[in-house]
């Protein structure tokens, strides 16, 4: 039942809306995406044949058929080339517009302020705390940060309240190895507010 109905229906959704653990019990997203992509192509081809044979005057049938064919083929190609189960283009576009609008509303309600940097060598949990009004791109745990001629590792990323809701706790390293994945902080365009 999962492979015939639920799996193919859920693969139409963007990946972040799918239940992650249900697939492990019943099947794989790969098989479900192949089934839904194939069904989408078949439904689009049948709609195109109906539009052509019946000479229906409505262009809506033609656009629906073209969309279903292209979307089904695109989803199957992405799956085969990148081994990635993607949702339909329309739902992905709606989701992206929602996320963009949500982020714009959040940014309008929370003005950008300078980062607050706290350097505390005696703290056993962290030695550098950076509070920011915006989420920092590529700042995830275990990344190295070069700050004030020292190297730190990001240990924890927290969400708090207030004007600086993004909190990064970093632990000092005895020595660091400069490399392409090391983040230099602060970038020249960012000013800091000391505690």
Image (cartoon, rainbow, N blue to C red):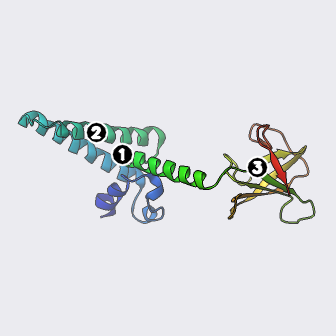
Q: Residue furthest right?
A: 122
Q: How many marks?
A: 3
Residue at 37% x, 57% y: name it. Answer: 10
Residue at 39% x, 64% y: name it. Answer: 26
Q: Nearer the viewer, residue 86 or 168?
A: 168
Q: Are marks 2 and 1 in contact (CB under 8 Å)?
A: yes
Tell me how far mark 3 sits from mark 1, CA to CA: 38 Å
Label 2 crowd (10 A; few <14 / some 14-19 / many >=20): some
Residue 114, disc = 3
**Element marked by disc 2:** helix
Circle nearer the viewer, 3 or 2:
3
Q: Nearer the viewer, residue 106 or 84?
A: 106
Disc with the residue nearer the chain's start (3 vs 1): 1
- Quadrant containing the N terminus in the rendered view: bottom left
Residue 146 point in image, percent of width and height: 83, 44
Tell me if 143 is positioned left or right of 27 in this view.
right
- Which residue was labeled with disc 1? 90
Residue at 31% x, 50% y: name it. Answer: 36
Residue 27, disc = none
Disc with the residue nearer the chain's start (2 vs 1): 2
Circle nearer the viewer, 3 or 1:
3
**Element marked by disc 3:** loop
Tell me how far mark 3 sits from mark 2, CA to CA: 46 Å
Residue 124 vs 31, above or below: the answer is: below
Label 3 crowd (10 A; few <14 / some 14-19 / many >=20): some
Q: Quadrant of residue 54?
A: top left
Q: Nearer the viewer, residue 50 or 94?
A: 94
Residue 74 point in image, percent of width and height: 37, 38
- Which residue was labeled with disc 2? 67
Residue 60 point in image, percent of width and height: 19, 40
């Amino acid at each position: 039942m999962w492979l015939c109905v639920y799996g193919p229906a859920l693969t139409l959704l963007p990946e972040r809306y799918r239940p992650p653990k249900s697939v492990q019990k019943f099947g794989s997203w790969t098989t479900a995406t192949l089934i839904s992509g194939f069904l989408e192509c078949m439904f689009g081809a049948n709609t195109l044949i109906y539009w052509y044979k019946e000479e229906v005057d409505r262009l809506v049938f033609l656009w629906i058929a073209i969309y279903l064919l292209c979307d089904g083929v695109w989803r199957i190609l992405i799956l085969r080339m990148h081994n990635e189960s993607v949702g339909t283009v329309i739902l992905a576009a709606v989701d992206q517009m929602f996320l963009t609008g949500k982020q714009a509303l959040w940014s309008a309600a929370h003005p950008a302020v300078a980062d607050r940097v706290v350097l505390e060598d005696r703290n056993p949990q962290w030695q550098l705390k950076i509070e920011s009004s915006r989420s920092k791109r590529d700042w995830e745990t275990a990344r190295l940060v070069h700050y004030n001629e020292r190297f730190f590792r990001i240990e924890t990323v927290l969400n708090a309240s207030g004007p600086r809701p993004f909190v990064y706790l970093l632990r000092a390293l005895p020595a660091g190895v400069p490399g392409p994945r090391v983040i230099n902080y602060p970038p020249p365009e960012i000013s800091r507010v000391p505690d």
